[in-house]
Amino acid sequence: MRVLVLGGGGREHAIGWRLKKDYKEGEFFFAPGNAGTEKIGINLSINPEDPYEVASICAELKIDFIFVGPENPLAKGVVDILTEEGRLCFGPTKKGAMLESSKVFAKKIMEEAQIPTAKFSIYSIDDFKTGKLKTDKLTPPVVIKASGLCAGKGTFVCKTKEQIDEAIRRIFVEREFGDEGNQIVVEEFLDGKEISYFALCVKNQFKTIGFAKDYKRLLDGDEGPNTGGMGSYSPVEYGDEKLREKVENKIIKPLMKKLTEKEIEFTGILYAGLMIGKDGEPYVLEFNTRLGDPEAQVILPLIKNNFFEVILKALSEEKIEDIKMENHALCVVMSSEGYPSKYKKGTEINIKNEEGENFIIFHAGTKRENSKLISSGGRVLNIVGIGKSKDEARKIAYDIIEREISFPNSHFRKDIGL
Ligand code: AMP
Ligand code: GLY
């Protein structure tokens, strides 16, 4: 079988690594991939966000199976087009991907299905222009979210009136997110502990994979600006059986039922960003329709089943095997100097061993030039330790940074897992 993984980050290296581990005979391709995926298969320099370019390369290379990593190709309908052409895909159609690509759509579904989430109102740019949206009537703290895909930058947690004004100005006046900011969701601020939940879904059936925790801020102690994610670990202390049951019964089952009523078929990974409130109940902050990055890097190595086989079987028989997890994994992200603002590229990196019995280094923004490994993005390497406990996994990950990697002027958090 010929397999194409769409995307080029640490998540996609982890996906390719996992699928290859489960299916050694497979021929693997990545678009665009990175210097890590090059060791598993062939990198294709096409635009993964152009469904027609993807469809055409799939036809040319006779690709049998496509795993879509990031949200943008999904929102552009890559799965719809590939499926029409008779190719097997793992990822939702454009309609299913709206759970992530439209926060307005996701909130309305949650309301209809009575899924616990923050109370909210929806406003459009016209409401702003005509004065129907009265920002002075909004009392902080509130959370203001551009409805569309904004690469994780469209959410503003506003603790003061000034921050409310700034969020509205950036979305509706400066149009920082273009049309993705044509509508906003204004939400009640929820206090509690965050956790990421992942399920494998095929045609509105699902099986829980597990929970992970990610670290969004740049600096230790959750200080500094938001990033794509500076680290993660799985399993999570409070992501226990009890929470799993609550999430399945109060969130995922009602969601799947509602999607079925609306004749929307969801296949792929469903990722719920949750807040565990003071009452111990899970509230949905957002749905994503793909694996998280860097959550994939800690979830995928822990799956005990043959993950590739589980997906293929589920797609053909429409029955999903129970997914079992073992051990603990912790990921530390190494980023370029300056990230998430303007960052430096082209730094030479040396890695002694990329994988051992209890660790894996997943590449993100890397490329090879004249046989040298160099940085080519903001988030560059993901160092994953695997152990019998979180502490062991943590110790391994930080030891590997010391022992195996030379990456001058890089940045990483020292407090992942603490
Ligand atoms: P989102 O884009 O919806 O995932 O939100 C990004 C981050 O903003 C989340 O990980 C939370 O830390 C925070 N956040 C989003 N919604 C809320 C809310 N209603 N209450 C408190 N924090 C929130
Ligand atoms: N780690 C957060 C995300 O992938 O959206």
Image (cartoon, rainbow, N blue to C red):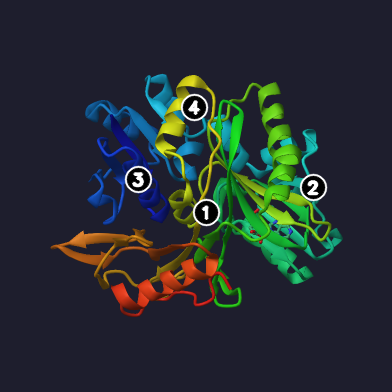
**The one of 117 and 147 positioned closer to us in this rendering:** 117
Give the number of the mark in front: 2 or 4: 4
Tell me the mark number nearer the camera, choosing from 4 and 1: 4
Using the rendered image of the protein, determine whether residue 197 is visible from the camera's viewpoint. Answer: yes
**Residue receiving disc 1:** 151
Which tag, 2 or 4, sits closer to the chain's start? 2
Kind of residue indicated by mark 3: Gly
| Disc number placed over residue 121 in the picture, else none | 2
The residues tagged by marks 3 and 2 sit, at their Cα atoms, a distance apart of: 40 Å
Residues at circles 3 and 1 in contact by the CB criterion of under 8 Å: no
User: Which label was assigned to residue 314?
Assistant: 4
Q: CA distance from mark 2 to mark 4?
A: 38 Å
Relative vertical location of residue 114 with respect to residue 85 in this rendering, above or below: below
Residue named by callout 3:
16
Mark 3 or mark 2, earlier in chain: 3
Which of the two discs, 3 and 1, labels the residue nearer the N terminus? 3
